Image (cartoon, helix red, strand yellow):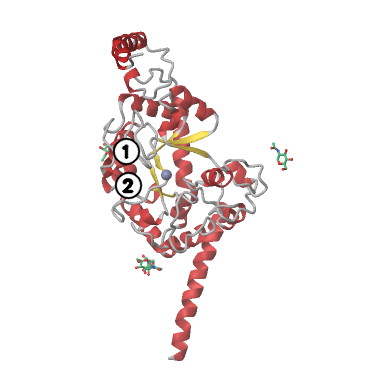
């Protein structure tokens, strides 16, 4: 009896170690490329972006989920050339369509500054696309997905070679984008709605479209999206990966941890050094080496090269601006809009008609 009691724990430890070893062996040649890390936001919060501060040192930062030693322990890498040089590359994603201010010119400029994905919305509607708060009932539907201008933004992203990110958008926007995009799209940090009914997650019918378009869902580790509570664990994150694999195929699964963007993280996935434990868990669940390499980076690299292939065959830029009455904002030049002169006239006429009233209210 005593021997048996001893043997079981020992066997369990050996087995888990061998999955760990296999995970690390795989990750030596295929690093993690995570779809969403908010370290730049932490640098803004902690240092107001004053990176000359001696404490703003990526090797010694301790208050963050992400620093260089943790990235090294987690086998985090990034695109092919930097990885072969032993460096950690980071691509730039822009989280929210409001950041282009309804300007195709700004979209093009951001591309040239290095943006390689744009999340169509953040937690608010843009003048041309609806966000997830509409599904939650907290915002009003405005574009009911993508407006005509939103569709032009999407086409221009296809032409430039910017990945379309559907995390944060309304289901109607997901549907429009998945239908219209000539290239696969990504969810840079969203999990499975079926396992946790949070509107930031991806519902099953959309997962079908993801499968059909060879698109990618990079699973978010935020406890509220994993278990719909503050408490979650690594095994529940693996459940989301398993689930998306079951519905949309292993080629549709990636990692979008949302490190340094969230407060509660699952037990066992506390910072970016922990990815090998999650990969070991997938191996324990009989994921093949190829499937695991897909999750780590191959699936994203496939989407990325398809996005670039489509970009190379699309020649004609979008030039029609957003309609003037959708532009929003109060400080504007209106050049380029043929109707703009009549708007100035209307405002002038309105002021003129108000003037007598104002005078009568101020009997000086
Ligand atoms: C950066 O900090 C150092 C040391 O405080 C200072 O000498 C230097 O002028 C600063 N550089 C800039 C660009 O602010
Ligand atoms: C999946 O794609 C095929 C071929 O592109 C198409 O015929 C089919 O309607 C699509 N299914 C869905 C659910 O969109
Ligand atoms: C993870 O959490 C779930 C739900 O609370 C629980 O059933 C499971 O045993 C936990 N797994 C581990 C390995 O802690
Ligand atoms: C993995 O495969 C082994 C061997 O075929 C099997 O015994 C085990 O039940 C499988 N585990 C899971 C989680 O599917
Ligand atoms: Zn986000």
Q: How many other residues sit within 10 Å of disc 2, few (<14), some (14-19) or many (≥20)?
A: many
> How far apart in space, not on screen, are marks 1 and 2 (Cα)?
9 Å
Mark 1: is the Cβ under 8 angstroms from ligand 2? no
- State which quarter of the image contains the N terminus: bottom left
Task: Answer whether labels 1 and 2 touch (C-beta < 8 Å).
Answer: yes
Q: Position of residue 180 (x, y in %)?
A: 33, 31
> For the point 39% across and 39% down, which residue is it?
122
Q: Nearer the viewer, residue 122 or 195?
A: 122
Query: Mark 2 = which residue?
Result: 202
Q: Position of residue 40 (x, y in %)?
A: 54, 43
Element assignment for label 1: helix
Q: Which mark is residue 174?
A: 1
Residue 188 in view of the camera: no
Q: Nearer the viewer, residue 147 or 23?
A: 147
In the image, is residue 329 above or below residue 77? Answer: above
Mark 1 / mark 2, whichever is N-terminal: 1
């Amino acid at each position: 009896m005593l021997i048996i009691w001893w043997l079981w724990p020992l066997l369990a430890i050996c087995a888990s170690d061998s999955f760990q070893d296999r995970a690390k062996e795989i990750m030596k040649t295929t690093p993690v490329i995570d779809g969403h890390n908010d370290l730049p936001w932490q640098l803004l919060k902690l240092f107001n972006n004053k990176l000359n501060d001696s404490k703003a040192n990526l090797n010694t930062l301790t208050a963050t989920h992400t620093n260089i030693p943790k990235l090294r322990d987690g086998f985090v890498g990034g695109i092919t050339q930097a990885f072969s040089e032993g460096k950690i590359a980071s691509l730039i994603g822009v989280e929210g369509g409001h950041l282009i201010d309804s300007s195709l010119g700004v979209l093009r400029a951001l591309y040239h500054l290095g943006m390689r994905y744009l999340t169509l919305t953040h937690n608010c509607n843009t003048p041309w696309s609806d966000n997830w708060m509409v599904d939650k009932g907290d915002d009003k539907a405005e574009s009911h997905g993508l407006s005509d201008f939103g569709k032009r933004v999407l086409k221009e992203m296809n032409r430039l070679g910017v990945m379309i990110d559907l995390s944060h958008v309304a289901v109607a926007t997901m549907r429009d984008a998945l239908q219209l995009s000539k290239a696969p799209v990504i969810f840079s940090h969203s999990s499975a709605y079926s396992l946790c009914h949070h509107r930031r997650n991806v519902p099953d019918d959309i997962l079908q479209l993801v499968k059909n378009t060879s698109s990618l869902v990079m699973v978010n580790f935020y406890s509220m999206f994993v278990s719909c509570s503050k408490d979650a664990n690594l095994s529940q994150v693996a459940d989301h990966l398993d689930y998306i694999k079951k519905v949309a195929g292993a080629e549709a699964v990636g990692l979008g941890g949302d490190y340094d963007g969230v407060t509660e993280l699952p037990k066992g996935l506390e910072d970016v050094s922990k990815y090998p434990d999650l990969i070991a868990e997938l191996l324990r669940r009989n994921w093949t080496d190829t499937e695991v390499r897909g999750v780590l980076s191959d699936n994203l690299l496939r989407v990325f090269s398809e996005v670039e292939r489509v970009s190379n065959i699309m020649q004609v830029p979008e030039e029609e601006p957003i309609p003037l009455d959708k532009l929003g904002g109060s400080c504007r030049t209106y050049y380029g809009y043929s109707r703009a002169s009549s708007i100035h006239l209307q405002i002038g006429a309105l002021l003129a008609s108000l003037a007598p009233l104002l005078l009568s209210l101020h009997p000086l």
